[in-house]
Image (cartoon, rainbow, N blue to C red):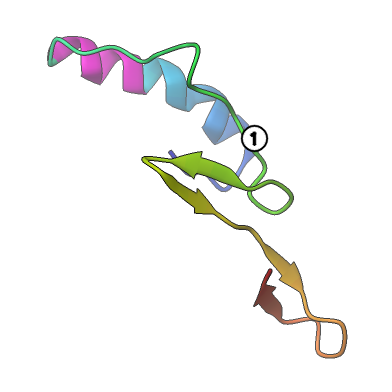
């Protein structure tokens, strides 16, 4: 799940759990965590998602 604000990401687990329960699914608490994508990388389905950093000269986002 991605969200632009801390408030939105705090609401996301309850909304997601509700929808997944309707489908007979659940979230693994051991595998689920909140990351700040501006600072942290994360692994998902065997892939590592790298965050972006500001460029040194032009301050535009650049891939790490």
Q: With 23 as the anchor, is 7 left or right in this view?
A: right
> What is the residue that sits farthest to the left in this orientation?
23
Q: Residue at x 48, y 20 (%)?
A: 31
Q: Residue at x 49, y 24 (%)?
A: 11
Image location (x, y in percent) of residue 23: 12, 16
Q: Quadrant of the C terminus?
A: bottom right
Prevailing SS of the magenta stretch: helix
Q: What is the quadrant of residue 25 in the picture? A: top left
Image location (x, y in percent) of residue 29: 47, 11
Q: What is the quadrant of residue 7 in the picture? A: top right
Q: Residue at x 70, y 54 (%)?
A: 38
Q: Residue at x 87, y 82 (%)?
A: 56
Judge whether residue 37 is colored magenta: no
Image location (x, y in percent) of residue 2: 48, 44
Q: Give 42 or 10, whichever is nearer the viewer.
A: 42
How many marks can you see? 1
Q: Give 57 or 44, whichever is nearer the viewer.
A: 44
Q: Give 46 or 38, whichever is nearer the viewer.
A: 46
Q: What is the quadrant of residue 45 in the picture? A: top left
- Stretch in magenta: 16-22
Element at badge 1?
helix
> What is the residue that sits farthest to the right in this orientation?
56
Image location (x, y in percent) of residue 52: 66, 65
Q: Give 13 or 38, whichever is nearer the viewer.
A: 38
Residue at image mark 1: 6
> What is the residue that sits farthest to the front in this orientation?
46
Residue 48, above or below 32: below
For disc 1, the neighbor class at 10 Å (few under 14, some 14 to 19, many from 20) is few
């Amino acid at each position: 799940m991605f969200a632009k604000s801390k408030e939105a990401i705090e609401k996301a687990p309850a909304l997601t759990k509700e929808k997944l329960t309707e489908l007979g699914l659940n979230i693994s608490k051991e595998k689920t965590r909140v990351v700040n994508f501006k600072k942290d990388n994360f692994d998902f389905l065997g892939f590592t998602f790298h965050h972006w950093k500001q460029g040194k000269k032009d301050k535009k986002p650049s891939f790490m």
